[in-house]
Image: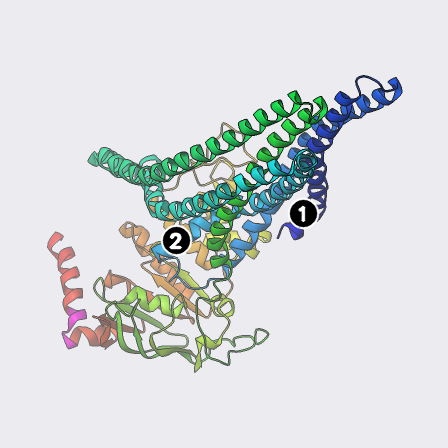
Amino acid sequence: MARRAAPWDLAALVALTVGLAAVPVVTAWLTRLVLDRLTGVAGAELFALATGLAATGLVAALLPLLSQFLGARFNRAVSLHAVDRLYSAVNSFHGLARFENPAFQDRLRMARGAAGQSVGRLVDGGLRAGGAALTTIGFLTALYAVDATMTVLVTASAIPALVAELKLSRRRARTEWRVSAAQRREFFYQMLLSGLDAAKEIRLFGASGFLKERMLAERRTADAETHRTDRREFLTQSLLALISALVASTGLVWAALAAQRGELTVGEVSMFVAAVVGVQGALSGLIRSLADGHQQLLMMGHYLAVVRAGPDLEGPPHPLRAQEHLPALREGVEFRDVWFRYAEDQPWILRGVNLFLPYGEAVALVGQNGAGKSTLVKLLCRFYDPTRGAVLWDGVDIRQVPVPQLRRRLGAVFQDYVPYDLTAAENIAIGDVETLAEPRKIREAASRAGVHEMLSRLPHGYDTMLSRMYAQEAQHDDETGTALSGGQWQRLALARAFVRDEPDLLILDEPSSGLDAEAEHDVHLRLRRHRAHRTSLLISHRLGAVRDADRIVVLADGRITEEGTHGTLLLDGGTYAQLFTLQASGYQEEV
């Protein structure tokens, strides 16, 4: 990944790493030669050695700065590449199951952290480990030239440090995974306390203290787990530091006594001390780099688990080839003996549903909360696949169709539409991002939704940011965006569905929720004109909004219990008639 993201920076960093590894060893050797030749040698030779030592010091001062500059640029490039790869994988998940799985959300959070840091830190740690290894070899060679026994002792003292650091890195990675859920919940409470969406209710109901305590409880849970790891790390590294200091002190005493006996020269003592300190420092750096790299590799496991997760929606063994296009709807969409549940240990949501949406007709789906209406829409959009049975498009199982091709044929207005912190034009173009290059289509969609005049009156028209949380770059820094009402957002969501050219199937899930009576009537008139001669599925709790559908289907406890026109269902006196009469009686009592 690093080679693909920034090959030249990587090559330069490798060269700088070798240079930085050589500098302290060369400095130690030159220092020994200078000290041993202070007397009894020609001035020219001593001047050359001193000049070489000064040049080495200059290089030692400049190389870290250059390495830091290139390293920062390299890390940005690698992080960008890793994030691009991660979200390319996330965007390839066509269904919703993984996004509704808490364990996957925790893994995705860890993967985001790994994409932002772990790849660059892994390469940087690998380079530092390589440089430390070169420095260690150089200093061990210098140390061996003075005394072989001390060389073995210094090297052996690093082995327990390596084992201990690797264990600590594994523990740190496990700790990060264990506290991930608590940190995600803490972030949730933070967003509630500091965000706009819940600000009114929290302040009105006086719930801020309760939520703050929940947030702090999650923080305490994470902090307690992290503290246990920090305490073990402190005790382990303190013991390792004592061992290292003991070895260095022993070596220093030995060198002083050997020099007193005339067994070592001043230059050799100097190089010995530098070599011991250098070997311990280099080995310590090598161990830290290996331990950090080990931890980052464990973190990268979450990244790779997401990137390599593969398709989330399984299909038949012989799907349609990608170059084959889904034909325009001509007969209709059929649910054939569809059963569905979200997991094997969960109850059935749909139980043997058989439903046909004829081409060119409007079918309304009604039922109480929990009847399975939203689940049926999810299957129709192929956010999930049926546990049993099939959904057919003109007789073709939609699992045989590439998901993007299927969804290009659909238009939808969802009850839980998203108000994006984008401009008005971008909010509409989310329905078909290619229309960003065609403002005329965006305006036409807004006109059909009855929101064009309102958007045109905004401070910057369609380029106005529809958020008070972010300012638009083209606007002045002190200029905030515009907030829309719930009804205005509802119409904007409607325009988002209208911007898509001629969808074969239009899904309208509570398209008028939150509107006043006049606005609701206007919206349904516009929807009736838009869905004329189109196949559409209309879902609404307000039965007056579905009475003009070609066919009304009642869903109860995952099964279709009634089916017919508004008039026939009223005559049957079943669930639909009872619900309609109950709603109508409320208006009649008011009159």
Instruction: Identify which residue, 258 or 297, lies in the foreground.
Output: 258
For label 2, the SS is: helix
Residue shown at 51%/81% (left/top)?
318
Asked if residue 589 is among those painted magenta in the image, a careful observer would answer no
Spot occupied by residue 257 in the image (x, y as percentages of width and height): 61, 23
Instruction: Identify which residue, 224 or 452, lies in the foreground.
Output: 224
Bin the neighbour count of mark 1 within 10 Å (Cα to Cα): few under 14, some 14-19, many 20 and up: some
- Location of residue 334 (image quadrant): bottom left
Numbered disc total: 2
Spot occupied by residue 284 in the image (x, y as percentages of width and height): 55, 37
Foreground disc of the pair 2, 1 = 1
User: Which residue position is annotated with label 2?
Assistant: 105
Spot occupied by residue 46 in the image (x, y as percentages of width and height): 83, 20
Seen in the picture, residue 97 relative to 471 is either above or below; the reply is below
Residue shown at 74%/30% (left/top)?
29
* Numbered range of the magenta stretch: 572-577
Which sits earlier in the primary sequence, circle 2 or circle 1?
A: 1
Asked if residue 576 is among those painted magenta in the image, a careful observer would answer yes
Residue shown at 65%/29% (left/top)?
272
What amino acid does circle 2 point to? Gln
Seen in the picture, residue 393 relative to 586 is either above or below; the reply is below
As drawn, is 499 to the left or to the right of 491?
right
Question: What's the magenta bit mostly, secondary-structure-wise?
Answer: helix
What amino acid does circle 1 point to? Ala
As drawn, is 428 to the left or to the right of 23?
left
User: Which residue position is annotated with label 1?
Assistant: 6
